[in-house]
Amino acid sequence: MVALLADLVNIDSGSYDKCGVDAVGDRLRAWLEAAGISCETFPNDVFGDCMAARIPGSGSGNRPIVLMGHRDTVFPDGTAAQRPFRIDGDQAFGPGVAWSIGEYRLGRLR
């Protein structure tokens, strides 16, 4: 999980950086699909594509769960190189590590 967090934090994904936001989505998609979770992409020509990941219910008592978040950060291009992911003690640092993108990265999807 820490490797995924590092990969995602080290991608520049500013709010208006479609390529960067899509790159974060591609990395998340690879991780989800490796875990057997199917994903669907909804393309957007201007901003980062939207993605839906679905886990089918396995019994009559299961109910759907919706997890929502965003994959962009407010930082300009080049910030990930200036402040790459790092761990100091029990804390992780890097652009976006504590926002929704960090929540994905910290394993809330486990």
Image: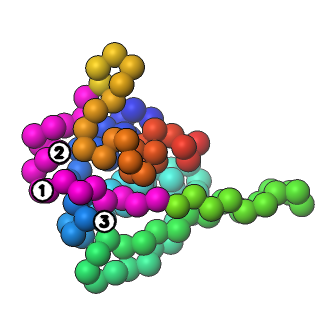
Res. 83 in view: yes
Determine whether, in the image, residue 93 is placed left or right of residue 62.
left
| Mark 1 to mark 3 CA distance (whole Å) | 14 Å
Q: Residue at x 46, y 68 (%)?
A: 51
Residue 96 percent coordinates (x, y): 30, 46
The amino acid beneath tag 1 is Asp
For the residues labelled 1 and 2, say whether their Cβ atoms are less than 8 Å apart. Answer: no
**Dominant secondary structure (helix, strand or loop) of the stretch shown in magenta:** loop
Q: Secondary structure at mark 3?
A: helix
Determine whether, in the image, residue 13 is placed left or right of residue 89.
left
Q: Secondary structure at mark 1?
A: loop
The amino acid beneath tag 2 is Ala
Residue 44 percent coordinates (x, y): 34, 81
Quadrant location of residue 22?
A: bottom left
Q: Secondary structure at mark 2?
A: helix
| Mark 1 to mark 2 CA distance (whole Å) | 8 Å
Determine whether, in the image, residue 37 is placed left or right of residue 24.
right
Residue 58 percent coordinates (x, y): 80, 56
Q: Residue furthest bottom?
A: 45
Quadrant in the picture for the N terminus: top left
Q: Disc 2 marks which residue?
A: 80
* Above or below for 78 versus 84: below
The amino acid beneath tag 3 is Asp
Q: Disc 3 marks which residue?
A: 22
Q: Disc 1 marks which residue?
A: 77
Quadrant location of residue 70?
A: bottom left
**First to last magenta residue range:** 69-86
